[in-house]
Amino acid sequence: MEAVTKFQKDNQSRFLDQLFELLKIPSVSADPNYKNDVIKAAKWLAEDLEKIGAENIEIVKTAGHPIVYADKIIDRALPTIIVYGHYDVQPPDPLDLWHSPPFEPIIKNEKIYARGACDDKGQLFMHLKAFESMVATNSLPCNVKFMLEGEEEVGSENLESFCKSYADKLKGDVILISDTSIIANDVPSVTSGLRGICYMEVEVNGANRDLHSGTYGGAVANPINILCDLIAGMKDENNRITIEGFYDQVIEASAEERIALNKAPFDLEGYQQELGINEVHGEKNYTTLERTSIRPTLDVNGIWGGYIGEGSKTVLPSKANAKISMRLVPNQDPGRIEQLFSDHFTKHTPASVKVKITPHHGGHPVLTPIDSIEYKAAEAAMHTTFGKHPIPQRSGGSIPIVALFKEVLKADSVLLGFGLDTDDIHSPNENFGLFNFYKGIETIPYFYKYYAEMKQA
Ligand code: BES
Ligand code: MN
Ligand code: MN
């Protein structure tokens, strides 16, 4: 491992320069205007993979954005690690809240600021540089396959068919993903679960046109008022979701699990202060750590309708819209939740308006075993580089493909992330600590080493 460490030290600044190049490509998957930039990022990665010694590199076209595949098979008898990451990023909006342009990376306070710095270009790139370090020093202990996608932030619509058609090529023992967080830089953790997601859009329609709110107000339903009622009605006074049957499939965490979970270091005062809030808010009888991991949620992500321009306009709008997401926990099924949500919404809609419900993406929740070889290898790797045993932590975010990998590729994933929850992913001023970037590059080769050893023991 000394050679790997030395190689990494000697190449530190080049690794960072290269990450900057990648971060400069605005690979926003949601916006068709950036289609060519998404392709550019895929090509850029394929070229780097070529330079660092990967083989069989392909930029696989899909119905949407491409998937980059590459591998290095040193010996078929050895275990194979499949590295997954996504090179697409969230839209940078709102732009005016960025302190520096989102696609012009800069270092400030020992952090890299750019859209995608943490989610997930920075984390994905750690894998390329870790791989490069092992190849360059002749110390790759097993086979590797890379699968880098460009549609994670828009629901990974085409990954399933890719996994099915590439099932043979994608044979491997474990999927390694860095797209999650650790608790703190001095409190390492391995993610042991992710929430699922069910994302819906609703439209409430009233009269066939906007009306004068004096002439008609009071007599004709206001779709915005009705939408607000419907949304408000989906939670009770204890902040429990009132959708009939919503909790039926939820596996309640045992008392022991809850005790263990709440042992993770958490400073409520600091949390509130950092967010600029006076008090946290959530389901009664659960702690903040529980609310963000083992409990499902329902949140409005966006809501619009009526007049929102300068000054005031008296109007009774004809329609209102909202995008609503529900985070799911084991064993909730996104398809079933979609149905329950639609039934609830329809049932509670008064006859004075009509509703249209459109489902967006969904994803299953996952738990990754913490007694498996891959978990133990991840734990040992972090222990080596952080000098501390990592804590298993269930994350509140979603990576829908993890459940898909299990189903299609029959392989478990290990969620070895290096971000921090405060990295502002999806927000203005997304950042990734230099400490975290280099710690990831340092830790990943240990994962390979321990995994290969444990798997063959
Ligand atoms: N990397 C995140 C997921 C994540 C964030 C996991 C924080 C753990 C901690 C991923 O890129 C993401 O944003 N996923 C989406 C889901 C997708 C269907 C758009 C999410 O969680 O909103
Ligand atoms: Mn991500
Ligand atoms: Mn994301």
Image: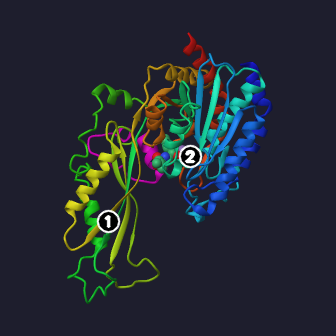
Q: Which residue is mark 1?
A: 356
Residue labelled 1 has its Cβ within 8 Å of some atom of ligand 1: no
Tell me which label, 2 or 1, sits earlier in the chain. Answer: 1
Q: Which residue is mark 2?
A: 423
At 61% from the left edge and 41% from the top edge, which residue is drawn? 148
At 25% from the left edge and 48% from the top edge, which residue is drawn? 240
**In the picture shown, does residue 223 fall above or below 405?**
below
Badge 1 density bin: few <14, some 14–19, many ≥20, Cα 10 Å: few
At 47% from the left edge and 27% from the top edge, which residue is drawn? 391
Left or right placement of residue 290 versus residue 393 in this view: left
At 74% from the left edge and 28% from the top edge, which residue is drawn? 133
**Residue 245 position within the rendered picture, expressed as x and y whole percent measured from the top left:** 22, 46
Residue stretch in magenta = 266-290
**Residue 259 position within the rendered picture, expressed as x and y whole percent measured from the top left:** 33, 28
Element on which disc 1 rests: strand
The quarter of the rendering in which ligand 2 is drawn is top right
User: Colour scheme in the image?
Assistant: rainbow
**In the picture shown, does residue 174 fall above or below 86?**
above
Foreground: 136 or 113? 136
Foreground: 89 or 190? 89
Residue 402 in view in this figure: yes
Amino acid tagged 2: Asp
Name the residue at the right extreme: 10
Q: Quadrant of the C terminus?
A: top right
**Residue 85 position within the rendered picture, expressed as x and y whole percent measured from the top left:** 58, 40
Residue 23 in view in this figure: no
Left or right placement of residue 31 versus residue 216 in this view: right
Q: Which mark is residue 35?
A: none
Res 439 → quadrant: top right
Q: CA distance from mark 2 to mark 1?
A: 36 Å
Q: Is residue 282 magenta?
A: yes
